[in-house]
Image (cartoon, rainbow, N blue to C red):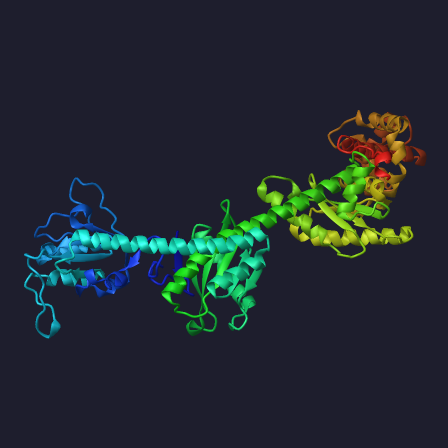
Amino acid sequence: MAHPHLTIDGTDGTDGTDGTDGIDGNGHVPIRTLLAEPLLRGRVIGGEAGLGRTASWCLPLSEVGHHAISGATPRAGSGAASGEGPPRDLSGVAVHLPLATLTGESGEGLVAELAGRGAAALLAWSPPDGPAAQEGPAGRLADPAGLAAATRAADAAGILLLILPAEADYRAVSRLVGQKALAQTSHVLEYSTRVHRALAEVLARGSGIPAMARAITGLSRCPVMAMDADGETLACAGFDGTGCDPEEIGGLLAERLPDLRDRYGTAAGLIELDLRREGPAHATHVLIAPIVVGGELYGRLVLIEPSWPSDEHDLAQHRVIAEHGATLTGSEMLRQRSVRAAEERARGDFVEALAHGRFADPHELEARARHHGFDTAGRFAVFAATAGALLPAGRRDERRAAAVTRIAQAVEPSADRWTMAAAVGTFIVVIRQVAATGAAADPLAEQRAVAQFAQHLHRSLRAHLGDDLRVTSGRPGRGAAGVAASYYEARVAMGLARHTDASPVCGYDDLRVYAALKEVAASAEGRAFAREILESLRRVHSQSGDLEQVVIAYIRSAGNLNAAARTLKLHRNTMLYKLDRASRALRMDIRSADTQFMVWLAHHIDTLAAVTGALSDELSPPADDVLVP
């Protein structure tokens, strides 16, 4: 059950250890611990540097596969005998072998081969009637069996070479190692179960990430920090009286996490990290466990060791706590995300229902308005924001839209100004109360409030959505019916702003001409008039543009021929020729004010009809009997 982990010092280099010197849940028992058993109290003749290694099993030499003993010295790391396939990995395996196999130069080669394959220790045993290594003068090892070469090889490879007593045959030794490994695994599993049960109770109560951090601190007796995937601290606990500043630790981690993310991603497991402050003497040792849910990195759980070097048993417990703490903290983060997503979906559904006027009856409107705190008698304006970054292209874009919606929700927070934002299609829609509940309507004050909020909304979202962001607004209205009408106007203003290349922030009131022509553009007579005028110009085409474009540029330049020619990048004579063709097509003199007004009016009616027609399939007129309680 132990979490794989890496040990990294403060200079990004490894410290040369594999992080398994302490106890873990995989049954790896330190060699030093095994030598404390009476059965294994033999004679260490070489490789004392390997006392820190761990073993989880014991195998006889006959089962591990090795080169035939010969006068030749096999190279370290060589494979099994010819025809036996690739060499077997002996990591965590203590090899029980006859003492006689270690004599002479062949013993040196055998030790080098087994050490190269990762063996944890070599346990040499001689039967009661066989040769044995004996002590010489001054307690030094006599070498009647010729073990000097094997001893040198063990010292060079850093693998423990132990002479066992006569009663320590393979059966007894393998049983002892297996029992120790199984007992240790059972102990770690039992401790892991207790840790998991304690933290699961916190998760079941739904107390949040701060409560989970406090529970982890209570189990580990060390400071704890929970961070999100971007390195922001979500909760911390246990820092009182430790001399550690969570902000300082968070800053040091923020500097290191991008490098760790690039090097290991989410597959690094538990990471042990030294955070250098003033120098090596002031290093802070931390355990970092990634919080991964469904293959996605949600954040990191950080345990700060109160002292270093720490007790091996305490460090092993902290690794178990970090592993289970990260798992259950991830579950709590997922629960909170699910709750927040559900709340955002509910808000989005309510905003969309208000914008489109889609309520089954007034009772549904009253119930949902009461749940969301919407005042059905208040005055509200609707703002629509859109940009190329909001076009859905994948899951990442959906997350961006949700994040931008939360930013829009927090623009100009006010206790007496109800605000609700939601993503509706490729738009961020914000409903904003423009007057306090019960206040008398002041059109000028409301217009200023709408313009100010639109500018602030554009500034807040531009850094996240880019320079192509547009924000439009509708006129304030009362209650749910006013919201639906304001949303319609904001969408019409968005379409008109794109057609007329208007300012990135504009309201329906800023397009007063189109607002005045709304009823005309919706009538059959108005559309017939626009079609009759413009069709005569659109039927005439040339290489330098149609006549409608030429006439509109001429009218916009207030009849200035040279200015219109410069706008269209045409020669003055070409401009004169096209205006004459337009006059013949219209059967009216385009230079007269009446003709220019007719073409200008037809163009605006046609533009407004095109924008409102595109919205007709999406938006339907609000039903007054539903929206007005």
Estimate the x, y position of residue 541 in percent, counting from the top left.
Answer: 77, 27
Asked if residue 474 lies left or right of residue 443, the reply is left
Q: Between 565 and 263, which is closer to the camera in this rendering?
A: 263
Q: How many marks?
A: 0
Q: Between 347 and 222, which is closer to the camera in this rendering?
A: 222
Up/down of 602 relative to 219, above or below: above
Q: Between 20 and 260, which is closer to the camera in this rendering?
A: 20
Q: Quadrant of residue 575?
A: top right
Q: Between 51 and 69, which is closer to the camera in this rendering?
A: 51
Asked if residue 482 lies left or right of residue 191, the reply is right
Q: Quadrant of residue 572?
A: top right
Q: Residue at x 26, y 63 (%)?
A: 32
Q: Is residue 337 visible?
A: yes
Estimate the x, y position of residue 593 in percent, counting from the top left.
Answer: 93, 36
Up/down of 511 relative to 74, above or below: above
Estimate the x, y position of residue 134 in percent, counting from the top left.
Answer: 9, 66
Q: Is residue 566 visible?
A: no
Estimate the x, y position of residue 74 in percent, counting from the top left.
Answer: 15, 52
Quarter of the image for the C terminus: give it: top right
Q: Quadrant of residue 599?
A: top right
